[in-house]
Image (cartoon, coloured by chain):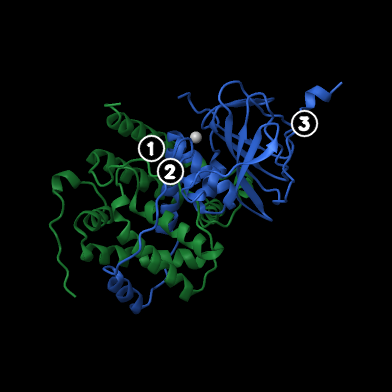
Chain colours: A blue, B green
Amino acid sequence: MTEITHHIPDALMAAYTAGSLPEPYALVVATHVSMCLECHASYEAHQALGGAVLETSGEAAVSEALKSDVLALLDAPVASEPVYKRTGVYPGPIMTALKGRAPKWKSLGLGVRQCILSGNAEGSVRLLYIPPGQAVPDHGHNGLEMTLVLQGSFSDETGWFGVGDVELADQDLEHTPIADAGPPCICLAATDAPLRFNSFVPRLLQPIFRI
Amino acid sequence: MTYVTSPDPDPADTAGFSQETLWMLAVRDQRDKAAFSALFDHFAPRLKGFIMRSGMGGGQAEEVVQEVMLTVWRKADLFDPGRAQVSGWIYQIARNRQIDVIRKENRPVPEELYEDQGSMPDASQVVGLEQEANELRQALGRLKPDQREMIEKAYLGELTHQEIKSQTGLPLGTIKSRIRLGLERLRHELKDMRTDD
Ligand SMILES: [Zn+2]
């Protein structure tokens, strides 16, 4: 496996740890942390800082009943929640989003496929399947767009992205990521653009039309 | 109700461990209710204060504290003192629970790194983590009040990532050494575990 070179920046990791990152991005971070030791270490460091804040930011007395309620519940039976593990190229957080099932792909044309994992007015996150030489579809975004490679690789004006790499793009970045030769590129892509039916179309290959 | 307190782990192996870590290990390995009770007394008021600071009323905050402390008991086998401080581990459980309550959605969490939870890590590694945690707390205490408030707001989940990013004075550099040491530990553990690959 090649070395991961595009990681989760500190501010994003702090927001993810604190839970202030919107769900589509949080899924990308959780998936990357599942694949990347360096970011796992970063995640643990941010948890340690959160723990220091918890230890030192003040106390509020709890009611007497709370402790006896909790102690009385220690031996109560609890239903165990399913834990989804990595399957193929899909790490645990994606399998959880898929509820343990294989992705249901929908064709976008030119061999490009997508599988929407979740979406609402605030953003969306989806799997993309891009054959070699095809462009990664344009998500359309107002703020941040995150694309994590799960299989294969893509390249654009800013560099090369292999398995585990995350590309962060803000609205100022004009880029045309193209899947490289080799196995089809499978990515996890999150955007803050509202999810609309059919809004997701293959990106035109700009250079071809540029004179 | 009667509590059976199991003997503490061998003191020779646990010298330098914090009291919280010893309680947590007794909960994990002996299902020790007296140790859990001590953890509750230490963390429940801190958790309630922490949760109320992010705007929740006292009643709802206590409901979250109850869920968090029950999770500490039920998921104790996931606690690894070689990788996490008790306070950091409980912090993450608390934030995840608050988000589940507020947003009615499950926060995506990373896959656990290892299968063999519950094994005792190298004691010096645990002590190293305890020292780092102390240094982090001291570094927090030395910050100027406005910087400290920014850190608290960030980890209470009150800032967007753009806001955290724009706080150029935010001393996130204090955790760089923690990240580096954590990475060394993970690489070391994985190397040990993958020898038969
Ligand atoms: Zn990384």
CA distance separating discs 3 and 1: 44 Å
Q: Nearer the viewer, mark 3 or mark 2?
A: 3
Rendered image quadrant of residue A135? top right
Q: Secondary structure at mark 2?
A: helix
Outermost residue, right direction?
A: A211
Q: Chain of mark 2?
A: A
The residue where tag 2 is placed is A45
Q: Indicate the amino acid at tag 3.
A: Leu
Residue B167 visible from this viewpoint: no
B119 or B91: nearer the eye?
B119
Contact between marks 3 and 2 (CB within 8 A): the answer is no
CA distance separating discs 3 and 2: 42 Å
Mark 2: few, some, or many residues within 10 Å (few <14, many ≥20)?
A: many
Residue A105 visible from this viewpoint: yes
Disc 2: residue Cβ within 8 A of ligand 1's nearest atom: no
Mark 3: few, some, or many residues within 10 Å (few <14, many ≥20)?
A: some
Q: Indicate the amino acid at tag 2.
A: Ala
Task: Give the percent coordinates (x, y) of residue B51.
Answer: 47, 65
Task: Give the percent coordinates (x, y) of residue B117.
Answer: 28, 45
The residue where tag 3 is placed is A204
Q: Chain of mark 1?
A: B
Residue B65's disc number: none
Contact between marks 3 and 1 (CB within 8 A): the answer is no
Q: Indicate the amino acid at tag 1.
A: Gly
Contact between marks 1 and 2 (CB within 8 A): the answer is yes
- On the picture, is B156 further left or further right than B80? right
Residue under the point 14% across and 59% down: B6
Residue B182's disc number: 1
Q: Quadrant of the N terminus of chain B?
A: bottom left
Disc 1: residue Cβ within 8 A of ligand 1's nearest atom: no
